[in-house]
Image (tube, rainbow, N blue to C red):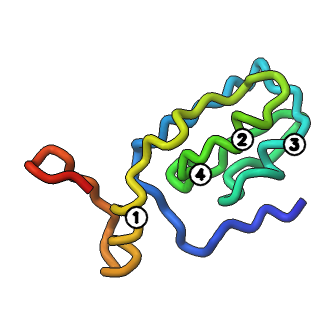
Amino acid sequence: MTNIKPSGFKYLKDVSSLKLNVDACIGCGMCEIVCPHRIFTIEEKTARITDVDACMECGACAKNCPVDAIQVDAGVGCASAIIKGWLTGSEPSCDCSGSSCC
């Protein structure tokens, strides 16, 4: 499978809840197939995360992993911060510490 990632896509830096248990992974490749941002590769019969900051926490990988080797808190991300970043050309920022949240 070609591992092409959308050009320049980044989520919020260092906040992804994505975790991969490489010891439990059987290398089936489902995560690589279903990930919309192509952040997984299969190397030496084991999945690897190539860019955790590109994970949008959709949960497709975890839902399709037959051995539950992937955990992610699907839906916890702040999509409006990403969209605002795309529209303004700035880094996505979700400052929910103030009186209003994204």
**Eyeballing the image, is 51 above or below 31?**
below
Which residue does the numbered mark 4 point to in the structure image? 51
Q: Nearer the viewer, residue 26 or 85?
A: 85
* Classed neighbour count for the residue bearing mark 2: other residues with Cα under 10 Å, few (<14), some (14–19), many (≥20): many
Tell me the residue at 40%/76% (across/down).
86
Tell me the residue at 55%/56% (across/down).
54
* Classed neighbour count for the residue bearing mark 3: other residues with Cα under 10 Å, few (<14), some (14–19), many (≥20): many
Mark 4 / mark 3, whichever is N-terminal: 3
Q: Is residue 36 left or right of residue 54?
A: right
Q: How far is the residue under mark 1 from the one under mark 2?
A: 21 Å
Q: How far is the residue under mark 4 from the one under mark 3?
A: 16 Å
Tell me the residue at 38%/52% (across/down).
78
Amino acid residing under circle 3: Gly
Q: Secondary structure at mark 3?
A: loop
Tell me the residue at 33%/71% (across/down).
84
What is the x, y in percent for residue 12? 40, 54
Q: Secondary structure at mark 1?
A: helix
Amino acid residing under circle 1: Ile
Q: Residue furthest left?
A: 99
What is the x, y in percent for residue 24? 78, 19
